[in-house]
Amino acid sequence: MGYWGYYVVARSGQPLDKCEALGGVREELTLLEERADGWQVWECPGGGEQARDVGSMNALAAETGAPALFAYVMDSACAVVEAAGPETGVWTACLGRAAMTGYIGGDERALEDYFLPPGDAAERAVGWARECGREVPLEPLDEVLRAAAEPSAEELFFRFLDRLGVRGR
């Protein structure tokens, strides 16, 4: 059995567990990493029947005044990504598309009922990064959005963060 849980990523001058937008999971949040330029990566475990509502990334972006995103990792096989920026708005994508089709009980076309296609998600990700003050190329993001979650969705998510320009120290 793989990992189930959330990663919450935002830039803020205060710890994210102090943000009202995350108040419903404040007690479950654990700081995982502090990255360059004030970026924070927090973890909130839980999955299956223990899945939590971590809150709205739109509300977190509004509260911090900076873009925010989360990934809900499902059994280390795939992840739902929701991102928001005060200017760019909200968008949703997935990582590990083949595995995600199994979770939704559909096919590749059915994924587009829930998530942006990889090319569209990559374009939105470039805009999100630009709002963060980063200029990032489209192709590496598109590549990650189309990749299998090998060896895990967690590693694919952190690769996605790096390509967004949210880098470690």
Image: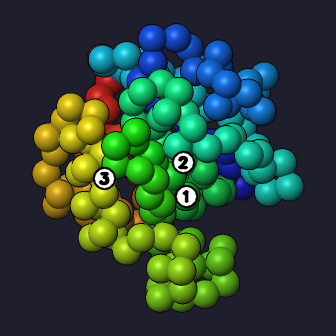
In the picture of the structure, the residue carrying the numbered disc 3 is: 125
- Residue that sits furthest to the top in the current view: 14
Give the number of the mark in front: 3 or 2.
3
Q: Secondary structure at mark 2?
A: strand
What's the mark number on residue 80? 1
Residue type at mark 1 is Val
Labels 1 and 3: the sequence-earlier one? 1
Residue 99 position, x and y percent, is: 55, 72
Residue 79 position, x and y percent, is: 54, 57
Residue type at mark 2 is Ala
Mark yes or no: residue 125 visible.
Answer: yes
For this rendering, which residue is in front, 69 or 168?
Answer: 69
- Residue that sits furthest to the right in the current view: 49
- Measured along the vertical axis of the image, is residue 163 above or below residue 10? below
Q: Secondary structure at mark 3?
A: helix
Q: Give residue 36's quadrant in the image.
A: top left
In the picture of the structure, the residue carrying the numbered disc 2 is: 71
Residue type at mark 3 is Ala
Within 10 Å of disc 1 (Cα), the crowding (few <14, some 14-19, many 20+) is many
Tags 1 and 2 in contact by the CB under 8 Å rule?
yes
What's the mark number on residue 136? none
- Measured along the vertical axis of the image, is residue 88 above or below residue 111? above
Residue 103 position, x and y percent, is: 66, 73
Labels 1 and 2: the sequence-earlier one? 2
Labels 3 and 2: the sequence-earlier one? 2
Q: Please tell me which residue is depicted at 73% across the width and 27% down the height of the picture.
A: 23
According to the image, what is the colour scheme of the structure? rainbow
